[in-house]
Image (tube, grey):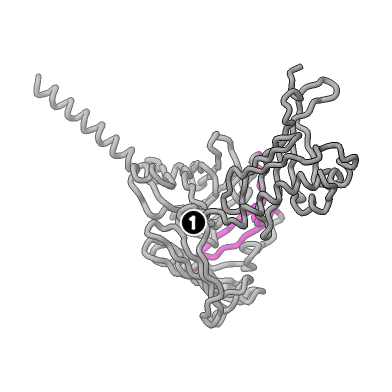
Amino acid sequence: MKKLFVLLVGIALLNLCQQAYAQEKSERYFRHLRFNNVSPHLPLSGIYEMEKQEALGTSYYLFKYDSKGHIAEIINNHYHTELRHPMTTPDVYRIVFNRKDAIETRTFFNKNGKQVSNNLGVFREEHEYDRKGFKVSLAFFDSEGQPVESRWNISRYEWFKDKRLVVEKRYNLEGEQVPLAPYLDFNNIGILYDEEERPLVNYNLNDKNKVVNSQQGVAEIRNTYDAHGNLVEWSYRNSDGELVPNRWGFAIGERGYDENGNILRNSTYNVSGKLIDEGSLVNNVQLRMAEVATREDSTAIKTKSLGYLIALQELKPELMKDVMHEDLAKRTIGRHRQDDNEIIRETSYEQMIDFADSWNKSGTRFPPKPDNRAVILDIYDRSASVKLISDNWVEYLHLLKINGEWKIVNLLWQYKDVRNYAPK
């Protein structure tokens, strides 16, 4: 009896371990999504897989799978800010996959569980597959379940095989064919996948599925990937296979990555292979913090801050124009005339120019020797915060360095005499 009990407990523990293992295998963590810049025929998939504990300490995508191994859900906890192509990621917090027979639906949600549109303006996608699992169509729908066009004017995709190519056609709501994207006038396209099911070449095709030049003179885009699946080079060519410039003027693009697949560098070249542009991509993977503010900036910030008061005191509207930005937001506490409740009162840039011309015409609004003091609270690169104290007011200013000049953009003020704010 005792042996039977031990045996049953052992079986129960084994089952629990197997369930835990199955649960663990039904969730996978990835640093990035596989790059895609051409077609939604390419399935969503992750690259740079991580263990759970490592993922929870950084930026990641969580993939959840159903019992058949199909993706059931993707949670987007990817907070790195490098530029990502809209075809690569829907750019929503949560994608829910439901598969019934030949149709897979994808619905998008925010963190509060509310249904939202993806970055192409679509609330729901319906992907249709044939019996062999080949994707044959994709249709877009709005929040009410009605057919809708994406912001690229596409309502429906259709795909079929032609020898080694996957041929794609796109249609709007009227059933008219539309180009690949606003920036690329490919009509029918042929996708040549490599052995890893990555788009190796994307061809512009005519109605007979022959490679032809588009109106921009481009017939194909060739892609090269590294071992992780990162796109490291892409080039634009005509129907003769010769390099040609795209609409932005370059023929070859290159990207560099760090060891975790974060994009760090982007380079472009002309048809002769000459470097046109090279630069680091701005993201929050690597930050360059601001240096200590210069003496010149500190002096300019104080001068512009005090210049606001001087413009009022000495009737100098041109000085007011020099220190204030046209998008100025100036606010204080006021009272509603009817119910005497406290409200926010605003003053515009135009009003400040008028005040500088007229408010102190009597010369009696300020003492003969005004007490103007500016205390810089903080400077970070092109942003500054200042406390301004005068005989009449205490004010808090925000300044920005725009086109090489410091300007007051925000101003919050109150009377120096707090008796102005006595309770009702």
Residue at x 70%, y 35% (from the top left corner) = 394
Q: Is residue 366 visible?
A: yes
Q: How crowded is mark 1: few (under 14 residues within 10 Å), some or many (20 or more)?
A: few
Q: Is residue 131 visible?
A: no
Q: Which residue is disc 1 drawn over?
A: 288
Q: In this view, does 80 lie to the left or right of 390?
A: left
Q: Is residue 241 left or right of residue 317?
A: left
Callout 1 amino acid: Arg
Quadrant position of residue 16: top left
- Count of numbered circles in the view: 1
Range shown magenta:
144-173
163 falls in the magenta region: yes
**Residue 326 at x, y percent in the picture:** 77, 50
Residue at x 87%, y 47% (from the top left corner) = 357
- Looking at the image, the residue that sits furthest to the front is 368
194 falls in the magenta region: no
**Residue 35 at x, y percent in the picture:** 48, 59
**Residue 246 at x, y percent in the picture:** 60, 73
